[in-house]
């Protein structure tokens, strides 16, 4: 559950995310890259999460060895 004093909606959303199998991932990238990515997604009319998820699926499906 969320920390602090979450409101009822926050609790409901967190419960849904857990039930639906969502996880939050946090990582650090250079601001120039993230700004350009956000702008490109906005121009394309797609969410950043959908582009990242698609890239993750494509990488998994390709069977590439990340250590190369």
Image (cartoon, grey):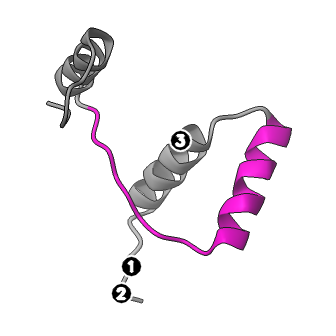
Q: Give the answer, above or below, for where 37 lies relative to 66.
A: above
* Picture coordinates of residue 64, whole percent (x, y): 41, 72
Residue at image coords 73%, 71%: 32
Q: Which mark is residue 58?
A: none
Left or right relative to 37: residue 7: left
* Residue stretch rendered in magenta on the structure: 22-44
Q: Which mark is residue 66?
A: 1
**Quick one: label 3 or label 2, which is nearer the N terminus?**
3
* Picture coordinates of residue 52, whole percent (x, y): 53, 50
Q: Give the secondary structure at mark 2.
A: loop
Left or right relative to 41: residue 21: left
Residue at image coords 53%, 45%: 54
Q: Could you say which quadrant of the image residue 56 lies in?
A: bottom left
The residue mark sitting in front, 3 or 1, is 3
Q: Give the answer, above or below, for where 55 lies relative to 65.
A: above
**Does the CB distance between marks 2 and 1 fall below 8 Å?**
yes
The extreme right residue here reads 43
- For label 2, the residue is 67
């Amino acid at each position: 559950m969320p920390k602090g004093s979450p409101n009822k909606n926050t609790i409901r959303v967190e419960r849904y995310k857990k039930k639906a199998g969502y996880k939050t991932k946090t990582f650090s990238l250079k601001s120039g890259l993230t700004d350009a990515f956000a702008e490109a997604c906005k121009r394309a009319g797609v969410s950043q999460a959908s582009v990242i998820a698609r890239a993750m699926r494509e990488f998994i499906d390709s069977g590439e060895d990340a250590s190369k």
